[in-house]
Image (cartoon, rainbow, N blue to C red):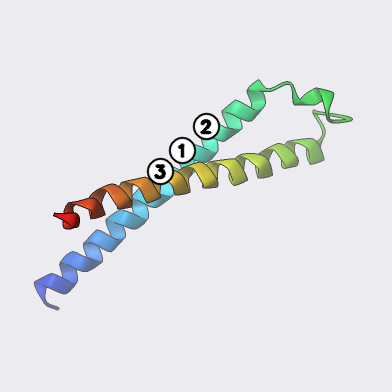
Amino acid sequence: MSDMIQTTMKMTGVAGMVGILVTLVCIWLAWRGLNALKLDQFLKDPSSGPARLLLLLLAIALGHQAAQFFLDYLQWSTQIRFLF
């Protein structure tokens, strides 16, 4: 393989790892944030399995959206150098 292909493959791998790590961190932060809310007022049994599953799914949805924003911003900020 040429050096250019190997470099491209490594850069793609690094971008994938950064994406995974940023997404997991954002999901964790969303989980922590949702646990700080008083959602027990809206749930019948906040300590039940379905209630915890709902919180997990909300954390995944919020965390994914936040991570997508940060990753998009990172990509845009690296692309802006091609403007000049």
Q: Position of residue 55 (x, y in %)?
A: 70, 37
The picture quadrant where one finds residue 59 is top right
Dot 1, crowdedness within 10 Å: few (<14), some or many (≥20)?
some
Amino acid beneath label 1: Val
Q: Residue at x 53, y 35 (%)?
A: 28
**Element marked by disc 1:** helix
Q: In what quadrant of the picture does the C terminus appear?
A: bottom left
The reply to whether callout 1 and callout 3 are in contact (CB within 8 Å) is no
The reply to whether callout 1 and callout 2 are in contact (CB within 8 Å) is yes
* Residue placed most toward the observer, 39 or 13: 39
- Residue 60: assigned label: none
Query: Mark 3 — residue?
Result: 70
Q: Earlier in the sequence, mark 1 or mark 3?
A: 1
Query: Mark 1 — residue?
Result: 25
Q: Is residue 39 left or right of residue 64?
A: right
Query: Mark 2 — residue?
Result: 29
Amino acid beneath label 2: Leu
Dot 2, crowdedness within 10 Å: few (<14), some or many (≥20)?
some
Q: In what quadrant of the picture does the N terminus appear?
A: bottom left
Dot 3, crowdedness within 10 Å: few (<14), some or many (≥20)?
some
